Image (cartoon, rainbow, N blue to C red):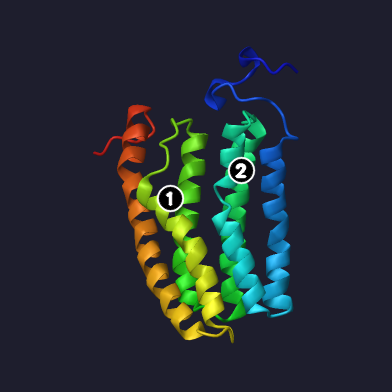
Amino acid sequence: MTEGPESVPEHFGGLRRQILTIPNLFTLMRLACLPVFCWLLLGRKDLVAAGFLLGALGATDWVDGFLARRLNQATEFGAIFDPVADRLLFFVSVAAAAASGHIPVWFCVVVLVRESLVSAGTVYLAVRKVTWLGVNFWGKTGSFGLMFAIPLLLLGASDLPGSGGVRVAGWVTGVMFLGAAWYGAYLYVAPARAALKQMGGQPESG
Protein backbone atom coordinates (compact mmCIF):
# COMPACT_ATOMS: atom_id res chain seq x y z
CA MET A 1 0.00 0.00 0.00
CA THR A 2 1.57 3.24 -1.12
CA GLU A 3 1.69 6.42 0.91
CA GLY A 4 1.19 8.88 -1.91
CA PRO A 5 -1.68 11.36 -1.94
CA GLU A 6 -3.43 9.36 -4.65
CA SER A 7 -3.90 6.43 -2.24
CA VAL A 8 -5.38 8.49 0.59
CA PRO A 9 -9.12 9.16 0.90
CA GLU A 10 -10.05 12.77 0.33
CA HIS A 11 -11.50 13.26 3.83
CA PHE A 12 -8.10 12.50 5.37
CA GLY A 13 -6.54 15.41 3.49
CA GLY A 14 -3.52 13.49 2.21
CA LEU A 15 -2.37 12.08 5.56
CA ARG A 16 0.14 9.23 5.66
CA ARG A 17 -0.90 5.63 6.11
CA GLN A 18 1.39 4.81 9.02
CA ILE A 19 0.87 3.58 12.56
CA LEU A 20 4.26 3.52 14.29
CA THR A 21 5.07 7.20 14.64
CA ILE A 22 6.26 9.27 17.57
CA PRO A 23 2.91 11.13 17.99
CA ASN A 24 0.95 7.85 17.93
CA LEU A 25 3.32 6.29 20.48
CA PHE A 26 2.86 9.33 22.70
CA THR A 27 -0.93 8.98 22.43
CA LEU A 28 -0.59 5.29 23.33
CA MET A 29 1.57 6.18 26.35
CA ARG A 30 -1.08 8.64 27.59
CA LEU A 31 -3.77 6.03 27.12
CA ALA A 32 -1.69 3.47 29.02
CA CYS A 33 -1.73 5.81 32.03
CA LEU A 34 -5.52 5.48 32.30
CA PRO A 35 -5.55 2.13 34.16
CA VAL A 36 -2.79 3.51 36.40
CA PHE A 37 -5.03 6.46 37.27
CA CYS A 38 -7.97 4.16 38.04
CA TRP A 39 -5.75 1.98 40.22
CA LEU A 40 -4.40 4.98 42.13
CA LEU A 41 -7.88 6.44 42.65
CA LEU A 42 -10.03 3.36 43.23
CA GLY A 43 -7.44 0.81 44.32
CA ARG A 44 -4.93 2.66 46.45
CA LYS A 45 -7.29 5.58 47.12
CA ASP A 46 -4.36 7.93 46.67
CA LEU A 47 -6.14 11.14 45.70
CA VAL A 48 -2.94 13.17 45.48
CA ALA A 49 -1.16 10.84 43.05
CA ALA A 50 -4.35 10.28 41.03
CA GLY A 51 -5.07 14.01 40.86
CA PHE A 52 -1.58 14.94 39.70
CA LEU A 53 -1.52 12.14 37.12
CA LEU A 54 -4.88 13.19 35.68
CA GLY A 55 -3.75 16.79 35.62
CA ALA A 56 -0.63 15.76 33.68
CA LEU A 57 -2.74 13.81 31.19
CA GLY A 58 -4.96 16.85 30.66
CA ALA A 59 -1.97 19.19 30.30
CA THR A 60 -0.41 16.99 27.59
CA ASP A 61 -3.59 16.82 25.50
CA TRP A 62 -2.01 19.03 22.82
CA VAL A 63 1.41 17.35 22.62
CA ASP A 64 0.62 14.54 20.19
CA GLY A 65 -0.95 16.97 17.71
CA PHE A 66 2.03 19.30 18.07
CA LEU A 67 4.46 16.43 17.45
CA ALA A 68 2.51 15.31 14.38
CA ARG A 69 2.80 18.77 12.85
CA ARG A 70 6.34 19.48 14.02
CA LEU A 71 7.74 16.14 12.83
CA ASN A 72 5.54 15.97 9.74
CA GLN A 73 4.10 12.67 11.01
CA ALA A 74 0.37 13.29 10.70
CA THR A 75 -1.25 9.96 9.81
CA GLU A 76 -4.69 8.56 9.04
CA PHE A 77 -4.45 6.33 12.10
CA GLY A 78 -3.42 9.22 14.34
CA ALA A 79 -6.29 11.38 13.07
CA ILE A 80 -8.68 8.75 14.47
CA PHE A 81 -6.64 7.38 17.38
CA ASP A 82 -5.89 10.74 19.03
CA PRO A 83 -9.50 11.98 19.47
CA VAL A 84 -10.71 8.49 20.40
CA ALA A 85 -8.00 8.24 23.08
CA ASP A 86 -8.87 11.72 24.37
CA ARG A 87 -12.57 10.83 24.65
CA LEU A 88 -11.76 7.54 26.37
CA LEU A 89 -9.48 9.30 28.85
CA PHE A 90 -12.18 11.86 29.56
CA PHE A 91 -15.08 9.45 29.97
CA VAL A 92 -13.24 6.89 32.10
CA SER A 93 -11.54 9.46 34.34
CA VAL A 94 -14.80 11.30 35.07
CA ALA A 95 -16.66 8.03 35.66
CA ALA A 96 -13.89 6.85 38.00
CA ALA A 97 -14.01 10.17 39.85
CA ALA A 98 -17.75 9.71 40.37
CA ALA A 99 -17.27 6.10 41.51
CA SER A 100 -14.65 7.20 44.04
CA GLY A 101 -17.29 9.18 45.92
CA HIS A 102 -15.07 12.26 46.18
CA ILE A 103 -16.88 14.24 43.48
CA PRO A 104 -20.69 14.52 43.46
CA VAL A 105 -22.29 12.11 41.02
CA TRP A 106 -24.63 14.82 39.70
CA PHE A 107 -21.69 16.92 38.53
CA CYS A 108 -20.03 13.99 36.76
CA VAL A 109 -23.35 13.02 35.15
CA VAL A 110 -23.85 16.53 33.74
CA VAL A 111 -20.31 16.44 32.37
CA LEU A 112 -20.73 12.99 30.80
CA VAL A 113 -24.17 13.73 29.33
CA ARG A 114 -22.73 16.71 27.48
CA GLU A 115 -19.78 14.70 26.18
CA SER A 116 -22.07 11.81 25.19
CA LEU A 117 -24.37 14.10 23.22
CA VAL A 118 -21.48 15.74 21.36
CA SER A 119 -19.85 12.37 20.63
CA ALA A 120 -23.13 10.87 19.42
CA GLY A 121 -23.76 13.91 17.24
CA THR A 122 -20.28 13.66 15.75
CA VAL A 123 -20.77 9.97 14.94
CA TYR A 124 -24.20 10.67 13.42
CA LEU A 125 -22.80 13.41 11.19
CA ALA A 126 -19.97 11.11 10.11
CA VAL A 127 -22.45 8.35 9.23
CA ARG A 128 -24.49 10.84 7.19
CA LYS A 129 -21.21 11.89 5.50
CA VAL A 130 -21.66 15.48 6.57
CA THR A 131 -18.59 17.68 6.22
CA TRP A 132 -16.69 18.02 9.51
CA LEU A 133 -17.89 21.14 11.30
CA GLY A 134 -14.66 21.74 13.19
CA VAL A 135 -14.21 22.50 16.88
CA ASN A 136 -15.55 25.71 18.36
CA PHE A 137 -13.69 27.73 20.97
CA TRP A 138 -16.21 27.27 23.78
CA GLY A 139 -16.51 23.51 23.40
CA LYS A 140 -12.75 22.94 23.20
CA THR A 141 -12.04 25.32 26.08
CA GLY A 142 -14.75 23.76 28.25
CA SER A 143 -13.56 20.18 27.72
CA PHE A 144 -9.93 21.16 28.22
CA GLY A 145 -10.71 23.13 31.37
CA LEU A 146 -12.69 20.26 32.90
CA MET A 147 -9.60 18.07 32.65
CA PHE A 148 -8.05 20.44 35.19
CA ALA A 149 -11.16 20.96 37.31
CA ILE A 150 -11.57 17.23 38.01
CA PRO A 151 -8.00 16.83 39.32
CA LEU A 152 -8.43 19.97 41.44
CA LEU A 153 -11.58 18.51 43.00
CA LEU A 154 -9.76 15.26 43.74
CA LEU A 155 -6.83 17.11 45.30
CA GLY A 156 -9.31 19.24 47.24
CA ALA A 157 -10.77 16.09 48.77
CA SER A 158 -7.33 14.86 49.89
CA ASP A 159 -5.31 15.64 53.00
CA LEU A 160 -2.93 17.79 50.96
CA PRO A 161 -2.01 21.04 52.77
CA GLY A 162 -4.29 23.80 51.53
CA SER A 163 -6.77 21.30 50.10
CA GLY A 164 -9.70 23.50 51.13
CA GLY A 165 -8.59 26.29 48.84
CA VAL A 166 -7.83 23.80 46.08
CA ARG A 167 -11.37 22.43 46.34
CA VAL A 168 -12.85 25.91 46.04
CA ALA A 169 -10.69 26.51 42.96
CA GLY A 170 -11.87 23.17 41.58
CA TRP A 171 -15.53 24.10 41.95
CA VAL A 172 -15.05 27.57 40.48
CA THR A 173 -13.22 26.23 37.43
CA GLY A 174 -15.51 23.20 37.21
CA VAL A 175 -18.75 25.20 37.06
CA MET A 176 -17.22 27.81 34.76
CA PHE A 177 -15.79 25.35 32.24
CA LEU A 178 -18.84 23.10 32.41
CA GLY A 179 -20.95 26.09 31.40
CA ALA A 180 -18.53 26.84 28.56
CA ALA A 181 -18.67 23.21 27.41
CA TRP A 182 -22.48 23.17 27.30
CA TYR A 183 -22.54 26.50 25.47
CA GLY A 184 -20.08 25.08 22.96
CA ALA A 185 -22.36 22.06 22.49
CA TYR A 186 -25.28 24.40 21.84
CA LEU A 187 -23.27 26.24 19.19
CA TYR A 188 -22.86 22.98 17.25
CA VAL A 189 -26.62 22.59 16.76
CA ALA A 190 -27.27 25.30 14.17
CA PRO A 191 -24.40 24.46 11.78
CA ALA A 192 -25.13 20.74 12.13
CA ARG A 193 -28.80 21.24 11.21
CA ALA A 194 -27.83 23.51 8.32
CA ALA A 195 -25.33 20.96 7.00
CA LEU A 196 -27.85 18.14 7.27
CA LYS A 197 -30.51 20.19 5.53
CA GLN A 198 -28.10 21.09 2.74
CA MET A 199 -27.28 17.42 2.18
CA GLY A 200 -30.89 16.33 2.38
CA GLY A 201 -30.51 14.84 5.83
CA GLN A 202 -33.38 16.80 7.39
CA PRO A 203 -36.99 15.95 6.60
CA GLU A 204 -39.05 18.95 5.53
CA SER A 205 -41.42 20.17 8.20
CA GLY A 206 -45.08 19.91 7.33
The correct choice, above or below, for 106 with respect to 123 in the image is below
| Type of the residue with mark 2 | Asp
Q: Is residue 96 left or right of residue 118?
A: right
What residue do we see at 60% from left, 61% from top? Answer: 56
The correct choice, above or below, for 32 with respect to 190 in the image is below
What residue do we see at 47% from left, 68% from top? Answer: 149
Give the image location of residue 79, x and y in percent: 59, 36
What residue do we see at 42% from left, 69% from top? Answer: 174
Tag nearer the camera, 1 or 2: 2
Q: Nearer the viewer, residue 163 or 50?
A: 163
Q: Nearer the viewer, residue 41 or 71?
A: 71
Quarter of the image that includes the C terminus: top left
Q: Nearer the viewer, residue 11 or 43?
A: 43
What residue do we see at 57% from left, 33% from top? Answer: 69
Q: Residues within 10 Å of mark 2 (few under 14, many from 20)?
A: many
The mark tally for this picture is 2
Q: Which secondary structure, mark 2?
A: helix
The correct choice, above or below, for 197 with respect to 49 in the image is above
Quarter of the image that includes the N terminus: top right
Q: Which residue is mark 2?
A: 64
Q: Within the image, what quadrant is residue 177 found in? A: bottom left
Give the image location of residue 21, x and y in percent: 72, 35
Q: CA distance from mark 1 to mark 2?
A: 16 Å
Q: Which residue is mark 1?
A: 140
List the single residue furthest toward the top: 6
| Type of the residue with mark 1 | Lys
Q: Which secondary structure, mark 1?
A: helix
Earlier sequence position, callout 1 versus callout 2: 2
Q: Within the image, what quadrant is residue 80 found in? A: top right
Q: Residues within 10 Å of mark 1 (few under 14, many from 20)?
A: some
List the single residue furthest toward the front: 161
